[in-house]
Amino acid sequence: MNRRGGAVFAALGGLLVAGCGQAVILPGPTAQTVTRFVATHTGYHPKDVHCPSGIPAKVGRSFTCHFTGPDGKYEAVLRIVSVHGSRVNYNIRSEITERAVPAATT
């Protein structure tokens, strides 16, 4: 992935109402949103996107998902910009956090 960062609004369909009645973000659909974002902007399709659970679906809230790219470890920071029913719109920025060390050749 040559691109070190980017921003876009991406839609997610899926909230979960917790026992206390608060809507929270579902990690599975959020990981799919990150995968589509990365694939659209870099052409790389990450297979191991991990997003946290229990994030309240509140505008302005930010959280981080992690994945492995071809150059190392990456993070995607998602900021919730709007919530409409079961649909959440994000501003997403991804960047490398740890470069992979090339294997030594002999």
Image (tube, rainbow, N blue to C red):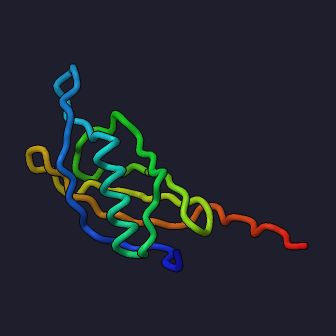
Q: Quadrant of residue 57?
A: top left
Q: Farthest top residue? A: 19
Give the x, y percent position of residue 19.
21, 20
Give the x, y percent position of residue 84.
9, 50
Which quarter shows the C terminus? bottom right
Q: Quadrant of residue 37?
A: bottom left
Residue at position x 25%, y 36% in the image: 24
Residue at position x 34%, y 33% in the image: 54
5, above or below 16, in the image: below
Q: Is residue 44 left or right of residue 58?
A: right
Foreground of the two, 93 or 1: 1
Q: Farthest right residue? A: 106
Q: Farthest left residue? A: 85
Residue at position x 49%, y 78% in the image: 3
Give the x, y percent position of residue 7.
34, 71
Q: Quadrant of residue 35?
A: bottom left
Q: Farthest bottom residue? A: 2
Residue at position x 66%, y 66% in the image: 99
Q: How many marks?
A: 0
Q: Is residue 6 left or right of residue 66?
A: left
Give the x, y percent position of residue 47.
46, 54
